[in-house]
Amino acid sequence: MSYLAKNYNRKKISFKHGKGSYLFSTDGKKYLDMLSGIAVNSLGHAHPKLIKTIRDQSKKLWHVSNAFQIPEGEKLAKKLCQKTFADYVIFQNSGAEATEAAIKIARKYFYSIGKPNKTKILCIKNSFHGRTLATIFASGSKKMTEGFGHVGGFQHFVFGDHKSLKKKITKNTAAIMVETIMGEGGIKVIPDWCLKGLRKLCDKKKILLILDEVQCGISRSGDFFAFEKSKVKPDIVPIAKGIGGGFPIGAVLMNKKVAIGMTPGTHGSTFGGNPLAMAVGNTVMDIVSTKKFLNNVKKSSKYFFFHLNKLKKRYPNIIKEVRGRGLLIGVQLSVDQNKFIKKLMDNRLLTIRAAENVVRILPPLNVKIKEIDIALKIIDKVCSETK
């Protein structure tokens, strides 16, 4: 029997080690990992540079309190700010914490400028911003919030419904918060023209724009941040997942304007920004933020999308749509999603579900073309066997 609580419906499989894009199960089977811990293992498994970083740093220092300066964190914050729109960073341990901090920063900003009633955050209905009490209510999913009472301060609009969004902005609205590419919600990309429209709307109404890049950020889209292609500058961006390459790291990035509210004592984290995590983050950042690496993500993405769309044409009754950008890929099905994912796993390909009957494909960002070919071959096989 398992003494773990039943809050996960776990598949009857476990792994003893991983290497690159592959996982090896405890019963000796080899699986192609196109899940990457849900967009976390950005450099695959057991990357030699990450192993070296963890080994070297673990011999020096794991943890000190944020009551002291942490040079490794200062270094990573500088890299993130120099690479992006941001002026300041607060480190966390997860995406949910980063999003929670983003909500706090937005509200505290308006409180700091004498507008304490501006606390409402507008979000897309059935989005995903984490699993804390505040973030589940930000996500606007009845399934996630059921049984957890009520946390106020969030309003919702339907994806793509601009009229509804505009009508819901009131004198108490503080910010609009959206995922640049919705992950759990079905791999839905917010178009560049729409991001530009959101920025203009926020400027006009004098509210903040929060772009949640926990899943789609850190080079997953082929750009370091998914919003970069639109040339839009947000006010606040929570990140996590890929920045640690498998090590728990979260962060919230912000511009100078909104940072004025974050004075000593307004927010904290015991483990956020610890030396071991920051050492790992610096190594990941050095690898994934280079032009050469990003170009390779775009190249792999183009190849993957081209061949997935060929499969869509071959199996029009099975594959309804291929969605996403970079290596954040969704295949919307016309057949049973769970059975399809099970068949992929039976053929040693690991994927995961998303809303709207979508199969999520999230390979390591350094995935090889020959590994993409193996994945395509398995998807082809499962499609051909599916009625």
Image (cartoon, rainbow, N blue to C red):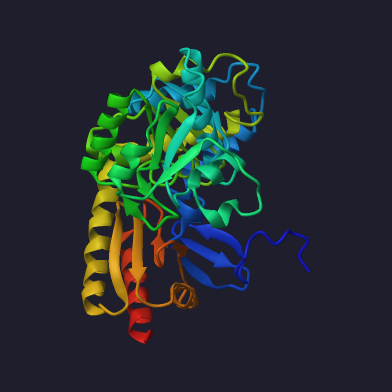
Q: Is 376 located above or below residue 202 in the figure?
A: below
Residue closest to the eye, 178 or 343: 178
Q: Is 315 located above or below residue 260 in the figure?
A: below
Q: Quadrant of residue 362?
A: bottom left
Could you say where residue 30 lies in the image, as x and y percent from the top left? 51, 70
Residue closest to the eye, 171 or 338: 171
Q: Is 187 on the left or on the right of 89, as rendered? A: left
Tally the marks.
0
Residue at horizontal 53%, vertical 59%? 18
What quarter of the picture does the C terminus occupy? Answer: bottom left
Could you say where residue 176 lies in the image, as x and y percent from the top left? 39, 35
Residue at horizontal 44%, vertical 49%? 127
Residue 119 visible to an observer of this rendering:
yes
Residue closest to the eye, 382 or 115: 115
Could you say where residue 273 lies in the image, as x and y percent from the top left? 57, 28
What quarter of the picture does the N terminus occupy? Answer: bottom right
Residue 44 visible to an observer of this rendering:
no
Q: Is 68 located above or below residue 299 in the figure?
A: above
Q: Is 324 located above or below residue 379 in the figure?
A: above
Could you say where residue 225 lies in the image, as x and y percent from the top left? 34, 38
